[in-house]
Image (cartoon, rainbow, N blue to C red):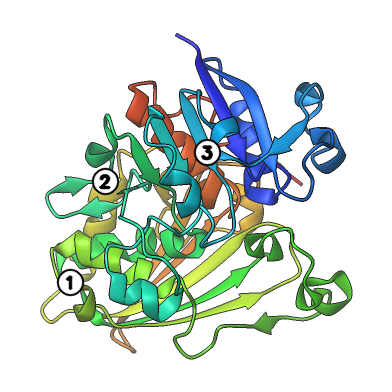
Amino acid sequence: MTYSVAVSGASGYAGGEILRLLAAHPDVEIRTVTAHSNAGQPLVEHQPHLRSLAHLTLQDTTPEILSGHDIVFLALPHGQSGQYTDALGGAPLVIDAGADHRLTSQHAWDAFYGGAFHEPWTYGVPELPVDGGKQRERLRAATRIAAPGCNASTVSLSLAPGVAAGVIEPSDIVSVLAVGPSGAGKSLKTNLLGSEILGTANPYAVGGTHRHIPEIRQALAAASNAAPDDIRISFTPVIVPMARGILATSTATIAAGVTDADIREAWQSAYGDETFVQLLPEGHFPRTADVLGANTALMGLAVDRAANRVTVVTAVDNLVKGTAGAAVQSMNIALGLPEGRALTVNGVAP
């Protein structure tokens, strides 16, 4: 069976990456691409690297144009998806790459986003440990999927094994991330101009204000069947001059009585059989260059007994494993297709 697909926000970074992956997927046909201000223009004017899709023209983003497809991807700014998902009740599968359907708590939504709150959908991070198993099982036959925030899924994957196994204290977590500006979207912003980011590192959303914090707390709470309020995290992202990528360094206090072997076993047990989340050998740590263009999260683990903390360093391509790859991987699971179809563990180098 070939599934018909519509992709909204197709002129942006996330939408373009979804299209790049789907263009190599043998079970889908990309029929419709939509945008707002760029509607009426050829797709390749905005995504010139997608040569196999040069025949497509951007259409207006309306429920009427998005309807009638087997699968609809929404790659829209936060707060804009809900107006369309409410009108797409008849679509067999809808995947939202924005934040509108990620959070289960309206209080958290109001505090970090504001605006209309929409019902939570199945979270699209298949490998994420959850109480009693993996998020993958919840994605099987799902019809509504919320793709993750790239920073949030990176930190959650980094720490969920330790939280689930009880080898780290969830009340004392610190994460600092080096992130590429593509994670902020394609809209013109002065602070993201080349002249503003080249040769410098710029922290932002400092002091517990980043919108991905409640998503991280929600995911880590699900790993241990705890309450989100039990998860306390200091989260600081820093924009660095690389187009793509996240390098997340996360630390947490080691729980009492836990051995070094217990710690490594928690992560090895969680990810030893996974294709797209890989724990590196002891003493090895990833670079963002190692995951460029790949759907992999590579992580290195260290035990710092002097500080009584575990350190996890994780690298992802924010546009692939962080967003579009997670969405396509979740789509494959929901449709009963091979999970890795149209996805690769191989990066691009140099």
Residue 275 in sight from this viewpoint: yes
Q: Secondary structure at mark 1?
A: loop
- How far separated are the C-alphas under marks 1 and 2? 27 Å
Q: Nearer the viewer, residue 242 or 264?
A: 242
Residue at the location (29% across, 76% down)? Answer: 107
> Quick check: 345 above or below 265?
above
Q: Which mark is residue 259?
A: 1
What percent of the width, then of the height, locates residue 266?
22, 58
Single out the mark in the foreground, 3 or 1.
3
Please state which of residues 245 and 136 is positioned toward the viewer in this rendering. Answer: 136
Q: CA distance from mark 3 to mark 1?
A: 44 Å
Q: Which residue is mark 2?
A: 135
Amino acid type shown at disc 2: Gln
Identify the residue at horizontal 79%, vertical 34% (top origin). Answer: 43
Q: Is residue 254 visible?
A: no
**Which image quadrant for residue 64?**
top right
Q: CA distance from mark 2 to mark 3?
A: 20 Å
- Label 3 amino acid? Phe
Q: Residue beneath label 3, please?
A: 73
Task: Tell me which label, 3 or 1, sits earlier in the chain.
Answer: 3
Q: Earlier in the sequence, mark 2 or mark 3?
A: 3
Task: Check disc 2: other Cα within 10 Å, few if <14, some if 14-19, many if 20+.
Answer: many
Say which of 166 and 263 sits in front: 166
Amino acid type assigned to the residue bearing label 1 in the image: Thr
1 vs 2, front mark: 2
Residue 7 x %, y % = 60, 36
